[in-house]
Image (spheres, grey):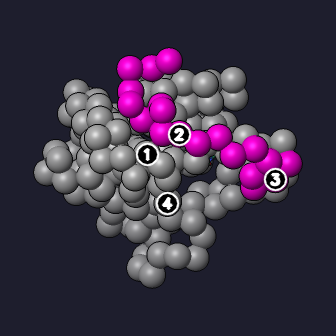
Amino acid sequence: MSAFLAEQHIRDVPDFPKPGILFKDVAPVLQCPAALQEVVDALANDARKYGAEVIVGIESRGFVFGVPIALQLGLPFAMTRKLGKLPFDRITEEYALEYGTNTVEMHTDAVDPGQRAYIVDDLLATGGTAAAAARLVERLNGNVCGFGFMVELAFLEGRKNLLGYPVNALIQY
Ligand code: AMP
C-alpha cells in the first residue's frame, strides 16, 4: 500500500481493452479532488527537483495530470499526440507494440533547444510510449530531465526502456 490516497481510487477493470489485460482505470482518481491534488503535488515537486522548464504530457491521460503540474509550476505544457492529430509542423516517432506499431507526434515548436523537459503520463507499462516521447523531445534538442507517472506496472519492467533517466512512479503494482 502506498501513502497515496489515489491508490484507493484506482479501479481494476479485467479484460479491457482485450482479454488478459487488467486495466487500471484512473477515472475515480479524477473524481476525488484530494487524491488528484496529492498526485499533482508529488509529481510537481519531482519536476521542480529536476529543474523542469517544460512539462510534456502523453495523450491523453498524460494531459490530465500534466497540465495542472505545469500550471502549478508556472511552466509551459507540450503535447505528444497520437498519429494524425496535430495540425502544425510535426515530428513523428514509431515504437513497437506486442503486435504491430504505434506512432506519437509532437509539434516542432513544442520544446525549445536546450529546454529541460519532464515527461508525464498516468501509467508506465512497457515504457514504449514514454521512450518514444523522450526521442521526440531529444530530436528537438531538448533535454529529458525526468519522467513522472502516477502508476507503474513494475512487473512489465518498463524502466528498462528508460535507462539513464530519473523515473518517479507514485504507486507500484
Ligand atoms: P506502455 O507504452 O506499454 O508503457 O503503455 C503506456 C500507455 O498505455 C499509457 O498511456 C497508459 O495509459 C496505457 N496503459 C498501458 N497498460 C495499461 C493498463 N494495464 N491500464 C491502464 N492503462 C494502460
Residue 29: quarter of image: top left
Numbered mark located on residue 60 in the image = 4
x 52%, y 76%: residue = 85
Numbered mark located on residue 10 in the image = 2
Mark 3 neighbour class, 10 Å CA radius: few under 14, some 14 to 19, many 20 or more: few
Give 120 or 40, whichever is nearer the viewer. Answer: 40
SS at mark 3 in the image: loop
SS at mark 2 in the image: loop
Residue 8 point in image, percent of width and height: 48, 32
Disc 3: which residue: 18
Of badges 3 and 1, the one in the foreground is 1
Q: Which is nearer the N-term, disc 4 or disc 1?
A: 1
Residue 150 point in image, percent of width and height: 45, 36
Marks 3 and 2, how far apart at CA = 19 Å
Q: Residue placed farthest to the left in the image?
A: 74
Residue 19 point in image, percent of width and height: 86, 48
Q: Residue placed farthest to the bottom in the image?
A: 87
Cβ of mark 4 under 8 A from ligand 1: yes
Q: Does 149 sit above or below residue 78?
A: above
Disc 1: which residue: 29
Membership of 12 in magenta stretch:
yes
Q: Given contact means CB atoms under 8 Å apart, are the residues at marks 3 and 1 in contact?
A: no
Of badges 3 and 2, the one in the foreground is 2
- The quarter of the image that holds ligand 1 is top right
